[in-house]
Image (cartoon, rainbow, N blue to C red):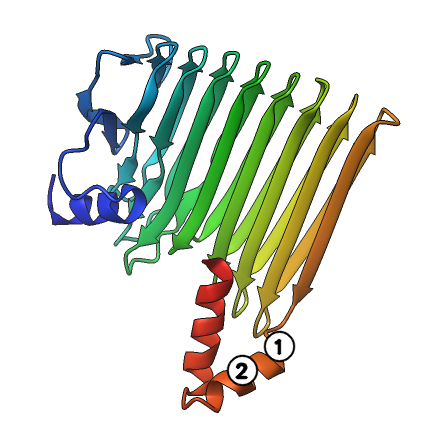
Amino acid sequence: MDKVDLELLKQIADIQATPKGAYNIRKNGQGIERQVTENVNIITKQDKSGIDIHVKENTKFEFIHIPVIITESGLTDVVYNDFYIGKNADVVIIAGCGIYNDCNKDSQHDGIHRFFLEEGAKVKYIEKHYGEGIGEGKRILNPITEVLLKKDSCLEMETIQIKGVDSTVRTTRGMLQENTNLVVSEKIMTHGKQTAKTIFEVELNGKNASTYVTSRSVATEKSVQQFESKVTGNTKCFGHVECDAIIKDKAKVVAIPEIIANSVDANLIHEAAIGKIAGEQLTKLMTLGLSEKKAEEQIIKGFLK
């Protein structure tokens, strides 16, 4: 790997040396480095592009890195990764994609990830997206995440779009059984003419299933963002979706909530707030000696923290 590869890996997965634990690094549509452990096995799919990740039951506190980097202009990379998490396992999975495009053709990565959590399993899943390069070719990322949670399992998902992504459609779907919990935290910043769309759909099918979704975004210049959520409660359950956005310049943000209660015991909440940076916040920071631009940058940084 060269300097550009290493910088991309640092941005999306905090990798600055050989990762500890299991890992699979993908570059320009091909796996280039892999390591497995006693408790985590990674197998190349035979029928299509991608890998199967198997975590043994009762595995505790292991890290699994599966970053993707693209440095080839004009490449469209599609990958299918399936995660099979054994009973009572507790692991951290760090994914993400970085695209460096310095030419005039579009580069695109579509990652389809499916999670199958057995009873009592816990996963923290971190996915960062990043793009750079001065070419006119676009950097496009379209991740799809599908989650099946069995009884007493939990998945915490943290997604971050750092910068440099021209177009993205981010889709998350979940099917939750009894006493399960799906927590999603999303942070997005767009500028220029970038577009970002989030689609979140979850079915709370088991008693006491719950989901908590928080989306925080900043849209500047002429960028456009759209957040769509659909939560269906089919029994005694709890769902809370919160969308907060800051807009600047000529940017546009749309929030489209949908909650469906098919049971009198379903407790579903959706909150959305979209607006500009509060004037009193700017004034307070500017009285401390910050310029208006620096004050705005500090407020945005704190908002997305």
Q: Residue at x 39, y 54 (%)?
A: 162
The answer to which of 276 and 19 lies nearer the viewer is 19
Quarter the C terminus occupies? bottom left
Check disc 1: other Cα within 10 Å, few if <14, some if 14-19, many if 20+.
Answer: few
Q: Going by the image, does 253 lie left or right of 132?
A: right
Q: Going by the image, does 196 lie left or right of 6?
A: right
Q: Classify residue 89 by image quadrant.
A: top left
86 is higher (above) or lower (below) than 264: above
Does residue 193 appear in this view?
Answer: no
Q: Classify residue 129 by image quadrant.
A: top left
SS class of the residue under badge 1? Answer: loop
Q: Position of residue 126 (x, y in %)?
A: 40, 38
Outermost residue, right direction?
Answer: 264
**Of the residues shown, which amino acid type is indicated by label 2?**
Leu
Q: Position of residue 106 (x, y in %)?
A: 37, 46
**Of the residues shown, which amino acid type is indicated by label 1?**
Ala
For disc 1, the marked residue is 278
SS class of the residue under badge 2? Answer: helix
296 is higher (above) or lower (below) than 162: below
For disc 2, the marked residue is 282
Q: Residue at x 72, y 32 (%)?
A: 238
Q: Residue at x 36, y 30 (%)?
A: 93
Q: For the residues labelled 1 and 2, say whether their Cβ atoms are less than 8 Å apart.
A: yes
- Spatial distance from mark 1 to mark 2, Cα to Cα? 7 Å
Q: Position of residue 270 (x, y in %)?
A: 74, 46
Q: Classify residue 239 by image quadrant.
A: top right
